[in-house]
Image: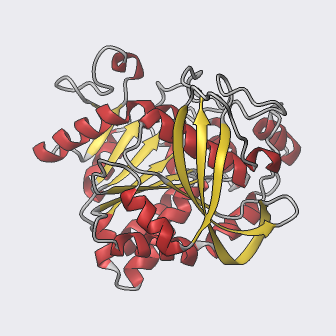
């Protein structure tokens, strides 16, 4: 496979949103669902467009966005606003406000009437623009009916199919900024748990930051972390090394995997056929053994629909099952059965819980 073929496979024919979609629109008689997103980025601010590009910044920007999200949505698909936005079918930003870090942390802990003590941080993957990551966060928040405003951390991805190496460097550059965000959230008395949700290369960043927190002796922050890695683009041996450095933390690391993820297959090819964590085959008995040895929760999400044609964005469809997932996870944790390899049954979720095994989980 040539580099050109890799680029074609990754890019497809989908048009990408411009920074214009970030500009707030005043809507009259808006019937759509309202979603608030807190955004953090170390991308360079482009004042002319009032947007963020792909260059690396030395400072960090904090913003609050309010979205109008269509109630009748087509799965995890996102329809970006047109020149004449239609809130019945398009995602539209209606409010935008700059924040300080302190104000963002306060919002993360007090933006909902029934805050349950959990803050969620989404870290996007390779080849994402700021606006793509922001709208994806809005989609997941709307589908999950979040109890508090989720935080998007957008590192300076080149947003280019040929920028794989540059994105890896940008991830490493962004460790301290994500570290600072998690530390600030963990210090908030009302925040008892932080779900760190890293997709693809964002999963690599999430693990690197957890490793950095360990080296800095920030066990108080690690104790609040629930790390969830969706389709993690991490070399298997690198991941083992990261786990060894981090050591045992209270909440097991959760891996959302699929052996039919074509984007990760391409990543493996580009990396010299090195295996990726997101491609783990849970039917392999060795995976079950490794999960137990390393205290991991490995869930195959192959049954979920993907909209990118590569099977790499299945995680976005998982949000609408969040309530069932939380209940299932709590029961598994109570029973001491949250370690090992499992299968997510999306079809079964339509009539019952998303998992099957004693009514909830199917162990492989």
Residue 50 falls in which quadrant of the image?
A: bottom right
Residue at horizontal 40 percent and vertical 16 percent from the top:
347
Residue 307 falls in which quadrant of the image?
A: top right
Compare residues 120 and 314 and report the one nearer the observer.
120
Query: x%, y% of residue 95?
Result: 64, 49
Name the side, left or right, on which 18 lies relative to 261: right
Of all residues, the one furthest to the top in this rendering is: 351
- Give above or below for 58 relative to 334: below
Residue 56 in sight in this render: yes
Residue 128 in sight in this render: no
Residue at horizontal 58 percent and vertical 23 percent from the top:
73
- Give above or below for 17 relative to 57: above
Of all residues, the one furthest to the front in this rendering is: 28
Residue at horizontal 79 percent and vertical 42 percent from the top:
17
- Give above or below for 212 relative to 74: below
Query: x%, y% of residue 194?
Result: 36, 60
Image quadrant occupied by the N terminus: top right
- Give above or below for 213 relative to 112: below
Residue at horizontal 76 percent and vertical 40 percent from the top:
10
Residue 201 falls in which quadrant of the image?
A: bottom right
Image quadrant occupied by the C terminus: top left
Query: x%, y% of residue 54?
Result: 78, 63
Compare residues 24 and 207 and report the one nearer the observer.
24
Of all residues, the one furthest to the left in this rendering is: 335
Name the colouring of the figure: secondary structure
Query: x%, y% of residue 308?
Result: 68, 32
Compare residues 187 and 361 and report the one nearer the observer.
187
């Amino acid at each position: 496979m040539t580099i050109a073929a890799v680029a074609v496979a990754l890019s497809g024919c989908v048009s990408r949103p411009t920074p214009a979609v970030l500009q707030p629109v005043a809507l009259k008689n808006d019937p759509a669902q309202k979603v608030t997103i807190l955004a953090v980025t170390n991308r360079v601010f482009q004042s002319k467009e009032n947007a963020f590009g792909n260059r690396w910044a030395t400072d960090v920007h904090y913003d609050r966005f309010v979205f109008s999200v269509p109630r009748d949505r087509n799965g995890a698909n996102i329809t970006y606003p047109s020149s004449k936005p239609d809130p019945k079918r398009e995602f539209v930003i209606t409010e935008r406000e700059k924040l300080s870090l302190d104000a963002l942390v306060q919002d993360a802990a007090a933006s909902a009437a029934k805050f349950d003590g959990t803050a969620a941080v989404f870290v996007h993957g390779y080849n994402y623009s700021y606006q793509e990551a922001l709208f994806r966060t809005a989609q997941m928040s709307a589908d999950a009916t979040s109890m508090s405003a989720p935080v998007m951390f957008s590192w300076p991805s080149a947003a280019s199919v040929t920028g794989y190496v540059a994105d890896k460097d940008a991830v490493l550059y962004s460790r301290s900024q994500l570290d600072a965000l998690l530390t600030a959230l963990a210090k908030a008395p009302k925040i008892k748990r932080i779900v760190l949700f890293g997709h693809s290369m964002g999963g690599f960043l999430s693990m690197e930051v957890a490793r950095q927190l360990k080296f800095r002796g920030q066990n108080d922050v690690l104790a609040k972390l629930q790390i969830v890695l969706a389709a993690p683009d991490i070399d298997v041996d690198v991941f083992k090394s990261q786990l060894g450095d981090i050591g045992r933390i209270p909440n097991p690391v959760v891996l959302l995997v699929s052996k039919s993820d074509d984007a990760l297959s391409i990543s493996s090819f580009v990396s010299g056929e090195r295996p990726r964590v997101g491609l783990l085959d849970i039917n392999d008995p060795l995976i079950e053994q490794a999960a137990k040895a390393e205290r991991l929760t490995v869930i195959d999400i192959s049954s979920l629909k993907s909209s990118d044609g590569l099977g790499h964005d299945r995680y976005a469809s998982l949000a609408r099952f969040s309530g069932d997932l939380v209940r299932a996870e709590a029961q598994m944790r109570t029973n001491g059965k949250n370690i090992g390899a499992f299968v997510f049954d999306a079809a079964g979720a339509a009539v019952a819980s998303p998992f099957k095994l004693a009514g909830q989980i199917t162990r492989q």
